[in-house]
Amino acid sequence: KWSYTPANVGSMTFFGTTCSQDYNTHIRGGGYDLRSDYWNKHGHFVDDVRYDLKGQYSTELYTQRMVDLISDKKSQESPFFIYMAYQNVHAPHMVPQRYKDQYSTHIKDGQEQTFAAMVSAMDEGI
């Protein structure tokens, strides 16, 4: 339920999905599920469905969002808290080929390559 997303229960912003979905299309159960929720300067809740990000690997999107938040906040003197939960390495197991290529010579099993590549994508983000 969207009423239980972080931005609806006390957090200032939320970027992501409520559960596992396709890492590139961001479709879950037949519906698009990638959002950037926040409270605007007038105190109104904004539920921004991010169709513009369709086709981009979610791990990289989450990393860029964290980099942007930290960059925006670093000049402020007040502390802030970020909770980042990558969807890696949950199903569906998906990763851009460039990450899998790193394991093609020494991991022969395709599923194991994908899993190792997903961890690498997440590690790169961290």
Image (tube, grey):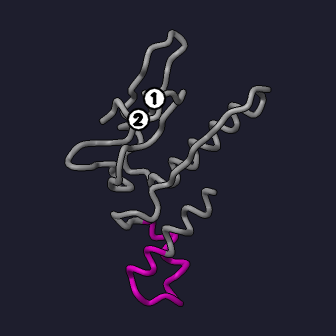
Image quarter (top left, top right, bottom left or bottom right) of the N terminus: top left
- Of the numbered discs in the image, which one, if any, rests on residue 51? none
Q: Amino acid at mark 1?
A: Val
Q: Is label 1 in contact with label 2 (beta carbons under 8 Å)?
A: yes
Q: Which residues are magenta?
A: 95-115
Residue 107, x across and y down, in percent: 49, 88
Q: Judging from the image, what secondary structure is the residue with disc 2 in? A: loop
Q: Which residue is mark 1?
A: 9
Q: Amino acid at mark 2?
A: Thr
115 up-or-down from 67: above or below: below
Q: Which residue is mark 2?
A: 5
- Residue 41 is inside the magenta segment: no
Side (left or right) of 51 relative to 126 = left
What residue do we see at 37% from left, 34% from top? Answer: 4
Image quarter (top left, top right, bottom left or bottom right) of the C terminus: bottom right
What residue do we see at 51% from left, 27% from top? Answer: 10
What residue do we see at 41% from left, 35% from top? Answer: 5
Q: Residues within 10 Å of mark 2 (few under 14, many from 20)?
A: some
- Residue 108 is inside the magenta segment: yes
